[in-house]
Amino acid sequence: MENKQKKGIAIVGYGGMGSHHGRMIEPLEEAYVCGTFDIKEDRQQAAKEAGLSPYPSFEAVLAAPEVDIVLIATPNDVHKEIAIAAMNAGKHVICEKPVTMHCKDLQEMLDCAEKNHVVFSVHQNRRWDEDFRTMQEAIDSGLLGRVFRLESRVHGCRGIPGDWRQKKEHGGGMLLDWGVHIIDQMLLMVPEKITHVFCRFDHITNDEVDDGFECTLWFESGVTAYLQVGTSNFINLPRWYVQGHNGSAIIEDWNQPCKTVYATGAPEGDATPIVTAAGLTKTMAPRNDENIQKKEFPIVRCDVRDFYRNFVAAIDGKEPQAVRNDQVMRVLRLLEVLHESDEKRQILPFEK
Ligand SMILES: NC(=O)c1ccc[n+]([C@@H]2O[C@H](COP(=O)([O-])OP(=O)(O)OC[C@H]3O[C@@H](n4cnc5c(N)ncnc54)[C@H](O)[C@@H]3O)[C@@H](O)[C@H]2O)c1
């Protein structure tokens, strides 16, 4: 397809994620990268080397008629000013996550989009992560029965990477970085009001911002979700662990299928005890084979490029936005309360 029939995307902030966007957009039929802009000269050069055309300034991006969409992939603290300038210049905007650090800033961005009649969306790309979709399919199969507990973890052992992610003023910290993804996923999985939340930050390698966190969300029906991000985990716990009244499901790691074990009848009368060095237990003995079934759910394949395709379709009025701004606002409100919960060392109410 000719470029003039495609939407032109200018990537502002051509670092790690900006260059990833360049590679992801390249094969699209609906859009193309018409240029980039980065405040660092070496990143302008890197764009050139990747076959892209860097604009000489941000003002030049705003003035360029071929730019339909500004895609913001800068550190978090400058998302808002870039988004507002772009929307006031009549550009549609895709903003990297976390969209910003405070709800009031997001509200200003949404008001600006409305005033200028442009489409604004946030790149919550991990909605297209295969582990998330695979676990969702296992839950939707009904084999687990009514789900009462979900655990979602992301573990690494390299501390906080890069420079700005370690600084509060730039919107650093793992709750804003990874938390925003796994919380967004969890709120899609459990479509209920949240009544209470608790969060505790880790400061193992960094005092200024959290280098990991754990949090619990209590939902209206009694379902609980536990989310954890760690950057000092030399042995990873499973990516997902979900319990229902009739079965359990686990995804051990990225790019793994979902293993489920579920009951096919009531527990047999008498269990064969497990004998350990210091005693025996019938309570913790597994069920007999005739009482359970195992099923593996293969990885659900998805295409994260559907995010960009949907954004273009939303501009053309053909599809509703896949990542809705009210959903993004809800996650941001939750992040604010999770910060407060850590500060106060308290369980706090939410959406009551
Ligand atoms: N959705 C995802 O999966 C994902 C993954 C990684 C990063 N991100 C997000 O992408 C954004 C960038 O992260 P990164 O890892 O690429 O950071 P990075 O440090 O690798 O790149 C940021 C780039 O922005 C440039 N920059 C800074 N201020 C600018 C400005 N005012 N105008 C133009 N350029 C500017 C920097 O020079 C740098 O090259 C962050 O918001 C981050 O949270 C999202």
Image (cartoon, grey):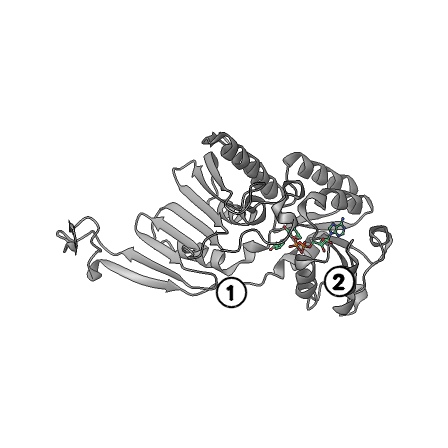
Q: Which residue is mark 2?
A: 33
Q: Which of the two residues, 301 or 70, is positioned nearer the viewer here?
A: 70
Q: Residue at x 35, y 49 (%)?
A: 243
- The image shows residue 28, relative to residue 87, as above or below, that is below
Mark 2–mark 1 Cα distance, whole angstroms, equals 26 Å
How busy is the neighbourhood of tag 2: few (under 14 within 10 Å), some, or many (20 plus)? many
SS for dot 1: loop
Horizontal side of residue 88 vs 276, given as left or right: right
Mark linked to residue 301: 1
Q: Position of residue 88 (x, y in %)?
A: 81, 43
Q: Position of residue 209 (x, y in %)?
A: 57, 42
Horizontal side of residue 344 vs 5, given as left or right: left
Q: Residue at x 25, y 59 (%)?
A: 292
Q: Which of the two residues, 317 or 332, is positioned nearer the viewer here?
A: 332
Q: Nearer the viewer, mark 2 or mark 1?
A: 2
SS for dot 2: strand
Q: Amino acid at mark 2?
A: Val
Q: Is mark 1 within 8 Å of ligand 1?
A: no
Q: Which of the two residues, 93 or 42, is positioned nearer the viewer here?
A: 42
Looking at the rendering, which quadrant does residue 103 occupy? Answer: top right
Q: Amino acid at mark 1?
A: Arg
Residue 244 in sight from this viewpoint = yes
From this viewpoint, which residue is outermost toward the left? 270
